[in-house]
Amino acid sequence: MAGVEQKKIMLSIKGLKKRFGDNIVLKGFDMFLEEGENLVIMGKSGSGKSVMIKCLMGLMQPDSGSIEIMDKNVLELEHAEFDQLRKKIGFLFQGSALYDSMTVQENLEFPLRKQNMPQKEKDVLVQEALESVGLLDAIDLMPNELSGGMKRRIALARAIILHPKIIIYDEPTTGLDPITAKEIIQLMRDIQMKYGSSALIITHDVDCSRVIADRMILLIDGVNYVEGSFSELSNSKDDKIQAFFK
Ligand SMILES: Nc1ncnc2c1ncn2[C@@H]1O[C@H](COP(=O)(O)OP(=O)(O)OP(=O)(O)O)[C@@H](O)[C@H]1O
Ligand SMILES: [Mg+2]
């Protein structure tokens, strides 16, 4: 249609179901992520956020449903193909998850280990990623020499080292003081501007959602219970929705 810009869908999940014995966790979860957007998914503890991400990343097999990442049906991909696709996705693990016995440089090089790439090129990528998070000076430090906020920045640098099209953030601000959390959120925005990436953000942090969400989905009772902007959802009269914003 003339004048209507169709945004590309980077990732979509349809009818995702997953149960563990009697515990039915996902009952037909649907979502899509548009190019360039920041989509926040909130759900209470145990609602199935990590299960959903594990299915998305091929670490867990769903019972049914479909998952497409950049137009590829991930449930039908061969290992090698999935590995290729995974390189286009940056993942910020909950709590940073740096390797304690490796320097910052070695931690950042970890996602590059399977790349057939000269060391010089790796050095350039490491330096660029560290510059993006403002921590080039920390290149030779060990994780135990970093503050919590610095660790999160380094983890973020590791997530973006291959210039991913999609970044998945699992609780990016949890465990940080409010000021450091704000800095991380600003950095997430800077990275989106710099790389034009799309982000899927799992968080409980209302302040983080308010600042970063272009759109939000609440995962309740195994389904995408509601979807909307922060102000639409935070002004909802529905008790189940309100509970997230108290
Ligand atoms: N491998 C597994 N085997 C059995 N049950 C599992 C497994 N993984 C997750 N579950 C169950 O699935 C449900 C959802 O777990 P999940 O880790 O996805 O929650 P979550 O929304 O990520 O919670 P949190 O906010 O605490 O991280 C829980 O009831 C959990 O016990
Ligand atoms: Mg989880």
Image (cartoon, rainbow, N blue to C red):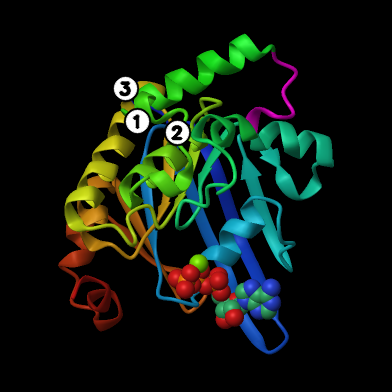
Q: Is residue 130 left or right of residue 49?
A: left
Residue at label 2? 157
Q: Is residue 132 left or right of residue 56?
A: left
Whether pointer 3 and pointer 1 mark residues with C-beta atoms closer than 8 Å, the reply is no
- Name the residue: 50% across, 37% down: 159
Relative to 81, does residue 169 appear above or below in the rendering? below
Relative to 164, does residue 44 appear above or below in the rendering? below
Badge number at residue 133: 1
Whether pointer 1 and pointer 2 mark residues with C-beta atoms closer than 8 Å, the reply is yes
Q: Is residue 207 left or right of residue 38?
A: left
Residue at label 3? 3
In terms of secondary structure, where does tag 2 sit? helix
Q: Position of residue 28 (x, y in %)?
A: 58, 69
- Name the residue: 34% across, 52% down: 148
Q: Position of residue 81 (x, y in %)?
A: 78, 34
Q: How many marks?
A: 3
In terms of secondary structure, where does tag 3 sit? loop
Distance in Å between CA atoms under marks 1 and 2: 6 Å
Q: Residue type at mark 1: give it.
A: Val
Query: Does the Cβ of the disc 3 residue fall within 8 Å of ligand 1?
Result: no
